[in-house]
């Protein structure tokens, strides 16, 4: 009996570690070590650090940022189109002579050598007073900024999933180590008691089976943790690197706001709804621009410079040499009014296309509004359920640990079998695993909710 009491006290030391809620790592495994020990100190990352690093390398987010920047350039171009443009023009017109007239063979020229150097000022008067293009570019920029925010929140959700998958994997790995050590102690106890003739050989067999089961669970937990670390490395580093650790904040989740507060935040901060509304506005401006193709255009071109038979400020005109040298520098003004008359239905077709697109975007806007209400309610209920599950499973862990302790005492007093003790150990392991999953589930539920509301 003394041998049995000694063995029970060995198991009790392990149970004390479980009851304190502290993970026990083996002496030969350092926390966060996955494959080989890195040469440099590992980078320690919080969730916010991970989000900041992921934004530097996420191709979808960088593409959205590029589109938003391009939209900004479109707005600058639309504003510039309202203003007059200044350009320079320099030509030489060489005309074949006919041996008789000084103007040569082309009747439009007044000499076989013509030099043209102009400064041209161009103004489109309709564009100067019409701000539809600017409004359209402004609305499109707002749409692409909203899509950039959508990409940022989607990336935050992805990083949050990977971050807490790694944390959960590490916790389960530590728990699996603990369970494996505990199963080994129970196996040693059973074998010692069997040698003392206090228990049957079946106790040792069952304890050995339990040890083999825990050993397999330990290997699976390590594989899960390794894969989660690989997933994080892909997100966080431009050059693939696993030399990092993450801060465990699973127990520090923020509180869940009330549903009324969530609805207010979603109405004010939802980028999907802003993007859909902005797309409708942009489409309406597209309709206006298509209809403006029916308008006449009025432009003016003011040219100042020379167009002469010699590249000089004063020269003899080839068509009237008897007049002597005359001044070449001067200006001319061209005002053009272009009235569209017939285009075989091209303009009306473009208007119909723009109207169809606008109507479709109206449908998508109403669908986005319905989806927002559904997702808001569903994500909030998920977060509520996950929070309640955390509280319930925390209590279940306490009960499972107490059950394991009591079954250990009963086994010591020969009032319980090894099957009951193993069952209690399995229940405690499952309860701890379910609790870790519930913590991660609550974190992910909050992250899903924040894709609609922004951070809270």
Image: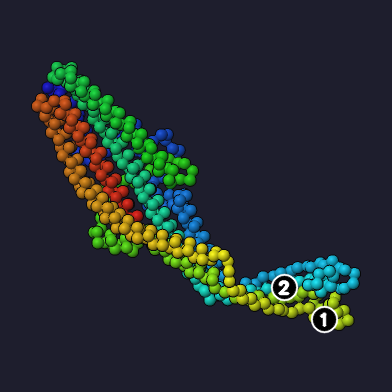
| Residue 326 numbered mark, or none | 1
Whole-percent x and y of residue 2? 13, 23
Residue 141 vertical placement versus 181 (above, below): below
Q: Quadrant of residue 203?
A: top left
Residue at 24% over, 59% down: 259
Check disc 2 and report the residue beneath it: 118
Q: Quadrant of residue 210?
A: top left
Name the quadrant of the C terminus: bottom left
> Quick one: SS at disc 2?
strand
View extreme (bottom): residue = 323
Q: Is residue 305 visible?
A: yes
Whole-percent x and y of residue 4? 15, 24
Drawn side of residue 73 relative to residue 146, left or right: right
**Residue placed most toward the observer, 413 or 341:** 341
State which tag comes first along the sequence, 1 or 2: 2
Q: Quadrant of residue 209?
A: top left
Mark 1 Cα shell of 10 Å, populated few (<14), some (14-19), many (≥20): few
């Amino acid at each position: 009996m003394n041998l049995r009491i000694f063995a029970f006290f060995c198991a009790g030391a392990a149970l004390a570690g479980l009851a304190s809620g502290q993970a026990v790592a083996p002496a030969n495994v350092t926390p966060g070590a996955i494959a080989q020990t890195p040469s440099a100190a590992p980078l320690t990352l919080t969730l916010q650090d991970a989000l900041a690093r992921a934004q530097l390398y996420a191709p979808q987010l960088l593409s959205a940022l590029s589109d938003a920047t391009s939209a900004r350039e479109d707005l600058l171009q639309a504003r510039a189109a309202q203003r007059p443009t200044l350009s320079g023009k320099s030509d030489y017109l060489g005309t074949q002579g006919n041996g008789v007239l000084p103007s040569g063979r082309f009747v439009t020229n007044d000499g076989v050598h013509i030099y043209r150097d102009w400064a041209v000022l161009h103004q489109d008067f309709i564009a100067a007073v019409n701000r539809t293009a600017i409004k359209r570019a402004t609305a499109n920029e707002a749409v692409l900024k909203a899509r950039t925010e959508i990409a940022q929140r989607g990336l935050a959700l992805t990083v949050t999933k990977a971050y807490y998958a790694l944390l959960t994997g590490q916790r389960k790995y530590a728990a699996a180590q603990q369970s494996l050590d505990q199963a080994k102690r129970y196996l040693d106890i059973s074998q010692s008691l069997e040698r003392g003739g206090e228990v049957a050989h079946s106790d040792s067999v069952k304890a050995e089976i339990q040890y083999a089961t825990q050993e397999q669970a330990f290997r699976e937990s390590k594989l899960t943790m390794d894969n989660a670390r690989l997933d994080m490395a892909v997100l966080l580093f431009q050059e693939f690197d696993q030399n990092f650790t993450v801060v465990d904040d699973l127990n520090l989740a923020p509180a869940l706001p009330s549903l009324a507060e969530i609805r207010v935040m979603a109405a004010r901060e939802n980028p999907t709804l802003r993007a859909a509304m902005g797309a409708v506005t942009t489409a309406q401006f597209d309709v206006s621009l298509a209809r403006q193709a029916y308008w006449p255009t009025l432009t003016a071109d003011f040219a100042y410079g020379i167009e002469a038979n010699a590249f000089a400020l004063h020269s003899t005109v080839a068509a009237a040499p008897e007049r002597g040298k005359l001044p070449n520098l001067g200006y001319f003004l061209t005002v053009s009014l272009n009235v569209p008359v017939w285009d075989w239905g091209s303009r009306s077709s473009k208007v119909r296309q723009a109207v169809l697109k606008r109507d479709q975007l109206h449908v998508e806007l109403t669908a986005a509004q319905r989806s927002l209400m559904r997702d808001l309610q569903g994500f909030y209920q998920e977060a509520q359920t996950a929070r309640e599950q955390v509280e319930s499973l925390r209590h279940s862990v306490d009960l499972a640990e107490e059950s394991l302790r009591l079954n250990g005492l009963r086994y010591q007093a020969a009032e319980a079998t090894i099957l009951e003790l193993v069952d209690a150990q399995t229940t405690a392991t499952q309860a701890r695993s379910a609790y870790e999953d519930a913590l991660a589930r609550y974190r992910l539920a909050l992250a899903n909710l924040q894709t609609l509301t922004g951070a809270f």
